[in-house]
Image (cartoon, rainbow, N blue to C red):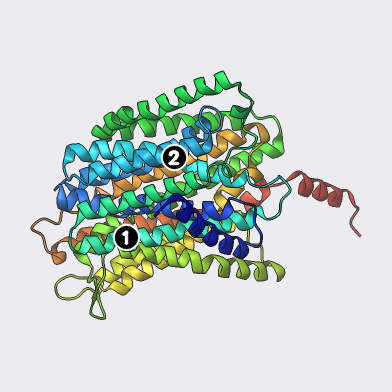
Amino acid sequence: MGRCTLQHIQDTILLSLNRAFSNQPKGTAALFFIQTTSTLSFAVLYSTLVLYTTKHLHFPIKEATEIMGVFGAFNYGLHLFGGYLSGRFLSNRNLFTGGMVLQVFGCGLIALGTSAMLYWGLALFLTGSGLNVTCINMMLTQRFTPDDTRREGAFLWNYAGMNLGFFIGFTVAGHYQLTSSYASLFLFATLGNLLAIALVALNWKTLADRNTPLLDASRRAYAGRFLVGAAILVGLVPVVWVLLLHPGSTETLIKGICVAVAAGLVYLTIRHRDRLERNNMWAYLILALGSLVFWALYQMAPSGLQLFAVNNVDLHVWGVTIAPQWIQNINTVVIVVGGPLMAAWFQRLRARGWNVDIPAQFSVSLLLMGLGFLALPAGIFFADGQGLVGFGWLFGSYVLQSIGELLISPIGYAMIGKLAPRKYQGIMMGSWMLVTGLASLYAGDFSGMIPEPDGATALATDPAYASLFAKLGGGSLAVGIALVVLIPFLRKLIRTRKRDAADMSAEAVPAH
């Protein structure tokens, strides 16, 4: 099929989608498809890595979950570096395309099926995915002027595209998992990356950068920066490879960096002179701790919870065998369907005078996470004679966790703009992303505590699972209850200039 024919088909599809987008700027429809296709490979690796390393490469559970923890930490941590590179050394479309190329080679190496190729494949893949995730958001936001009200709708569509990519990736990964066709699965993962590259190429001029420092550079300086950016992109691969080979030391290093960042934020908060902004920063730090607990448990889904599902849950429902990766789609469906419903419900509650704010949402999210994990020991208590837990208990756990995600995830980044002083917004946004990466490491630690299934029946390992899940669920409940108690205090800390001035004016009026 020629380029002209491909272009014609794409233009027809994009025209239809642009109409559905209510006349969005040119390029937004293409980015919807790019988001969907580029998510496929990440969904495959995210949902399959622990199963592949334990079942195909025969890694011990602790080693496999350590790798998964570092996988998540690198993915989130490199987002920051990618945000710095894009628009300064490489254009967003160049960095995105380069990252996709690395992901293609990474998935191809992993498909070879050896431990050595796994580490090189992951190094290539993580460098690509870590650096280019911010590029899509930057390309999308640059399609709009600062006062364009259509921006929110475009990002909602892109979020839907990402979840569509996850749904397809999880579904296909589960299909191949049932037959242990890992080589075919990882080769499939490369197709999404290749499609994303093709879509960017077809829309190359449309997706050009706007208002970035790189555009002000001379032609010679542009070429020099391009070479430096490309060298950084390629040079990161062996660095990530070395760190992946020593996940224990890498985990200690990353945790040490996180402790240093936390100490730095506390120092900045104490030294900050503006009382209102200082109080907001204290609220941010308290909520960040709650977020760390939530995401540490949430990110056990592709590791510890998935291994529990494979070894201790009856995955036969109405005559159908449920693939482990398909379980992840419970979250995807709840997010896509539940997001608009929850937004409408909150709007009604607020109209009736209910104070649904950041502290309340964080508190309830942790309570729901705790209940989700406590549902699993309850399921173990009612397990069948072989120790297999009914699928309904796992389903209910995922639904509770997903509702909790709806409460905490959308407001997390938006909260930075409200609580962070202008000069610290970059630092605090980066720290928030580090929290998610750190949580991935703790998720790996917790998942490493689960029993090895080799030679053991579900009946024999159920007590260890029940004990671990009860402790984790109880811990999340305790933190959630602590935040509930702190809600009045947090509400006093979280103030804006406008609200503070209104309160002061009210206090100045004599009581009657």
Q: Does residue 367 sit above or below 34 in this rendering? A: below
Screen quadrant of the C terminus: bottom right
Tell me if residue 303 can be seen. Answer: no
Nearer to me, 448 or 229:
229
Q: Does residue 463 sit above or below 45 in this rendering? A: below
User: Which residue is painted at 30% across and 40% down in the image?
Assistant: 105
Q: Which residue is mark 2?
A: 97
Nearer to me, 157 or 322:
157
Q: Residue furthest bottom?
A: 318
Where residue 443 sits in the image (x, y, percent)?
34, 48
Q: Give amino acid for label 1.
A: Ala
- SS for tag 2? helix
Q: Residue furthest left?
A: 455
**Residue 272 found in image quarter:** top right
Numbered label tally: 2
State left or right for residue 474 relative to residue 18.
Answer: left
Q: Earlier in the sequence, mark 2 or mark 1?
A: 2
- SS for tag 1? helix
Frontmost of labels 2 and 1 is 2
Tell me if residue 403 can be seen. Answer: yes
Where residue 205 sits in the image (x, y, percent)?
57, 41
User: Which residue is painted at 58% across and 47% down in the image?
Assistant: 140
Nearer to me, 147 or 406:
147
State left or right for residue 460 relative to residue 377.
Answer: left
Name the mark on residue 470.
Answer: 1
Nearer to me, 34 or 11:
11
State left or right for residue 69 relative to residue 18.
Answer: left
Where residue 41 sits in the image (x, y, percent)?
35, 50
Q: Does residue 280 sit above or below 45 in this rendering? A: above
Q: Give amino acid for label 2.
A: Thr
